[in-house]
């Protein structure tokens, strides 16, 4: 076996290869969906309506905005030393369920 045969790798593993680009896309729209139930509930539910004329890419990002408060619910001041843990969002949410047409996606 020659050195060239040993070093040959499938083109699928070439990380520097030019990636194909879909050129027939007419436009791209980013839409913000807010939960339709109050945030004080234990569940956050989002409704993304169906549209047969457009392709919906489920590249979902969840942005969370909040505020740290003391145990009594008061605002923190500059003298309070607080920090969050790594992967803070993993501590906030314990479970994520996704359904399409009332069918659970695992």
Image (spheres, rainbow, N blue to C red):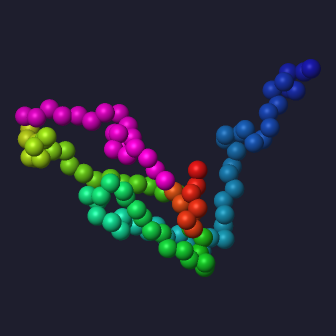
> Magenta segment: does it hold 70?
no
Q: Is residue 87 left or right of residue 49?
A: left
Q: Is residue 95 left or right of residue 8?
A: left
Image quadrant in which you'd find residue 23: bottom right
Q: Residue at x 35, y 39 (%)?
A: 91
> Magenta segment: does it hold 93?
yes
Q: Above or below — where is 24 with respect to 39?
A: below
- The magenta-colored residue range is 79-97
In the image, residue 84 lies at what x, y percent?
Answer: 27, 36
In the image, residue 77 lies at what x, y percent?
Answer: 8, 41
Q: Above or below — where is 39 with respect to 80?
A: below
Image quadrant in which you'd find residue 46: bottom left
Q: Residue at x 7, y 34 (%)?
A: 79
In the image, residue 7 lies at what x, y percent?
Answer: 81, 26
In the foreground, 106 or 84: 106
Q: Above or below — where is 61 with respect to 48?
A: above
Name the main secondary structure of what is drawn in magenta.
Answer: loop
Q: Residue at x 57, y 68 (%)?
A: 101
In the foreground, 43 or 20: 43
């Amino acid at each position: 076996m020659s050195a060239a045969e040993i070093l040959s790798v499938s083109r699928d593993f070439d990380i520097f290869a030019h990636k194909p680009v879909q050129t027939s896309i007419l436009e791209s729209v980013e839409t913000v969906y807010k939960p339709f139930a109050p945030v004080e509930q234990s569940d956050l539910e989002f409704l993304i309506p169906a549209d047969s004329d457009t392709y919906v890419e489920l590249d979902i990002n969840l942005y969370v905005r909040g505020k740290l408060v003391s145990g009594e619910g008061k605002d923190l001041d500059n003298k309070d030393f607080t920090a969050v843990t790594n992967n803070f969002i993993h501590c906030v949410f314990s479970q994520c369920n996704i359904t399409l047409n009332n069918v659970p996606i695992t």
